[in-house]
Amino acid sequence: MSSTPSPSAVKAYLLDLQSRIVQALEAQDGKPFLTDSWQRPEGGGGISRLIEEGHVFERGGVNFSHVTGAALPPSAAAARPELGGKPWEAMGVSLVLHPRNPYAPTVHMNVRFFSTVNSADEPVWWFGGGMDLTPYYGNVDDVRHFHQVCHDALAPFGSELHPKFKAWCDEYFYLKHRKEPRGVGGIFFDDFNALDFDDSFAMMRSAGDAFIDAYVPILARRKDAPYGERERDFQAYRRGRYVEFNLVFDRGTHFGLQSGGRTEAILMSMPPIVKWRYDWHPAEGSPEAALYTDFLVHRDWLQA
């Protein structure tokens, strides 16, 4: 096995992953995704694949980016000050999908690779990524399925990875100012280089490849469920939490903006219709209240 990073192999995989995911999503929606290729003046570029006002997706995007820089930005160098000011390279696929139907959950997935050098000009690299599910009206079978696929993707690389990455996801996607999780979690990992390069890359690929199996069956079951204005109103209210997290806490958003990334691609994750209310609480015993009591809790969903 090799410990020498191969950015070209990672890039080829990410481009193929983006294509496969878009193809699977287009089969569900029936409307083609737009393609927007872009270049970054500071170095690198990307391909944004976006859908708006589709048959299933109100808004969604599957973005590939490969950007480089002469000096590591503050958001990345804060935890590794010895790498500050070093040239860097980052690439990844990031997606957020906002279905129109309130019974079809929002989903996020990201897999990425980062490389730089240390003070001795030796290679330093790591992988990151994960996926998480954000339902508005929860379904235990859906949540269990999502977590099972995540578990199975990590199992070949060590039994300790899923509980570690699941707990990391629960901690990361937590709105501290609201004291509530963003959704029902999934997996999250960052700064991962515990295995050699080949095995670390294989783990990242397994996580990325798992997305279609984790999400598309849920979408297929829920996209045509009947709903009314009540459900749409609650969906818009809960989408506000998604906006709050992405703008206040998300490391990827902060890194993209601080590194001079393309704003349209970075803010692709924002839902198209959002509402906020002052000190609102769902009626006790209502389906909306069940989201808070039964789903926005940290639990072992594989034992649910």
Image (cartoon, helix red, strand yellow):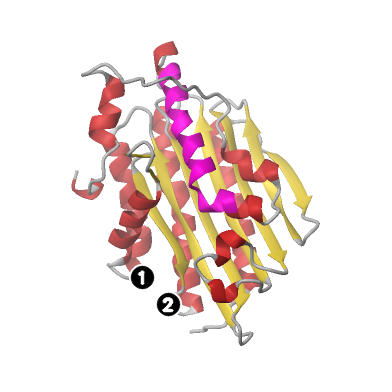
- On the image, the x and y values in percent for residue 231 come to 40, 18
Q: Is residue 3 above or below residue 115?
A: below
Circle 1 packing at 10 Å, graded few (<14), some (14-19), many (20+), is some
Q: Is residue 84 left or right of residue 212?
A: right
- What's the residue at 40%, 46% (across, down)? 173
Q: Residue drawn at (52%, 24%), measured in percent from left and top? A: 274
Residue at the right extreme? 41
Residue 136 located left or right of residue 298: right
Location of the C terminus (image quadrant): top left
Specify the label residue 195 is tagged with: 2
Q: Residue furthest bottom?
A: 120
- What kind of element bears circle 1? helix
Query: Which three-letter amino acid code belongs to the residue tagged 1?
Result: Phe
Choose between 284 and 142: the one closer to the eye: 284
Name the residue rendered at 23%, 46% in the picture: 299
For discs 2 and 1, the disc positioned in front in the rendered view: 2
As for residue 243 lying within the magenta part, the answer is: yes
Label 2: element kind = loop
Question: From what the image shows, is residue 197 above or below residue 178?
Answer: below
